[in-house]
Amino acid sequence: MYIDRRYRPRRRRSPWPIIILLLIVAGGVYLLATRTRFFQNPFNPLQPTPTPTRSALSYLAEAEDAYQAGRLAAAARAYTRASELDPTNDDILIRRAWLLCLLGHPGQAVELAQRAVAIKASAANLTMLAMAQDWDGRYDEAIRTALKAVEQDPLSAEARAILAEVYADRNNWTRALEEAQAAVRLNANSAIAQRNLGYVLERQGRYESAIAAFDRAAQLEPRLGYIYISAGYSYLALGDYRNALAQFQKAMEVNPDSPVGYDAFGYGSSLAGDSDRAVSLLRKAIDIDPTYGLAYAHLGHAYYTQLNWEAVIENLNRAVSLGVRNEQYYYELGLAYAYLKDCQNAVVWLEKALELNPNSGPALQGLRLCSKG
């Protein structure tokens, strides 16, 4: 019998390594099982730790802090969040409407104020609605709303002040001055009453008296840039560019997140002959709020003084698309097209200017220019 002497019987292996391995695996499974997040789908992000939802009161406090600091856009955003959480609070809607007016969006303010009046037709809510309608150029609606506010609360200085402003925009000088003076008698410490008295006096050409009223309003409420802007326009009417620009700069400083002060400062700089600074400031206004149509209109005018017709067309078209309606910007747009030999487009805008003012000299000049071309 052949015996393979190279053969060696296998030794029996010890079971302990396998037992130890099984224990390790079991321990790992237990560890993972006690931490269920490791078994979640790795393509689904972990859920964040729940945090308390902010309340409307929290946003109201944030809005008030921003308003006190003159940051009107920040205040408006906080009021918007508060209103989303408390949509039937008419006071929040009115505060948002007020800020949207100051930020140059009276059309949006009208919608908010209408919602507030639908909730509660108080004199204060009607007053805000009348102001928004007036600033949006809806004078017939504004006069009816303001009269309702005064009828509801004859002792409201703010209601009478807004009524005065609407009368002034309707060129009813006698009634405008009567209501403005009545507002100040009711509350001489109302910044709105003092500002609107100044506005009425300015519309009547009494610029020095208007500036005095604006100054009183600014002392009462130094955080509102629109008061300084009102004073600045009175200084412009007097040909005092230095003081006008100082007022516009103040408006820009007290409300740094609003485009309105930058726009006024830029426009004033353009009128003062500093078109380069005007362009810089107006671009800043647009950076702050790309939907603020008046800044595009003023930028178009600044480029008009530089004879940059392509830039005039670009910016004035944008202004018109955002709702700006003005004889000057219509004829400047028309003339820019005419100077580029595009009379087809020029005539459209020149005729729009004549619809607003049939005696518009620049528009008639543009039409003659095109007829010769």
Image: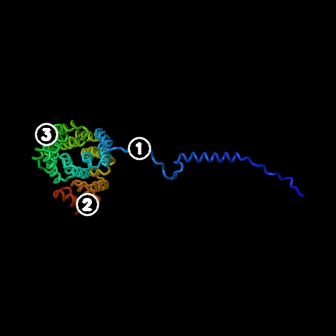
- As measured in the structure, the alpha-carbon distance from the residue carrying label 2 to the one carrying label 1 is 59 Å
Q: Quadrant of residue 318?
A: bottom left
Q: Residue furthest left?
A: 174
Q: Residue at x 18, y 44 (%)?
A: 237
The kind of residue on which mark 3 rests is: Leu
Q: Quadrant of the C terminus?
A: bottom left
The kind of residue on which mark 1 rests is: Thr
Verify CB contact (< 8 Å) between mark 2 and mark 3: no
**Nearest to the observer: residue 368 or residue 69:** 69
The kind of residue on which mark 2 rests is: Ala
Q: Secondary structure at mark 2?
A: helix
What residue is shown with label 1?
51
**Nearest to the observer: residue 28 or residue 132:** 28
Mark 1 surroundings within 10 Å by alpha-carbon count, few (fewer than 14), some (14 through 19), many (20 or more): few
Q: Position of residue 100 (x, y in %)?
A: 26, 48
First in sequence: mark 3 vs mark 1: 1
Q: Quadrant of the N terminus?
A: bottom right
Mark 3 surroundings within 10 Å by alpha-carbon count, few (fewer than 14), some (14 through 19), many (20 or more): some
What residue is shown with label 2?
346
Q: Residue at x 70, y 45 (%)?
A: 16
First in sequence: mark 2 vs mark 3: 3
> Is residue 273 at all visible to an observer of this figure?
no
What residue is shown with label 3?
186
Verify CB contact (< 8 Å) between mark 2 and mark 1: no
First in sequence: mark 2 vs mark 1: 1
- As measured in the structure, the alpha-carbon distance from the residue carrying label 2 to the one carrying label 3 is 52 Å
Q: Position of residue 315 (x, y in %)?
A: 30, 54
From the image, state whether disc 3 or disc 1 is nearer to you.
1
> Is residue 21 at all visible to an observer of this figure?
yes
Q: Residue furthest right?
A: 1
Q: Position of residue 77 (x, y in %)?
A: 32, 46
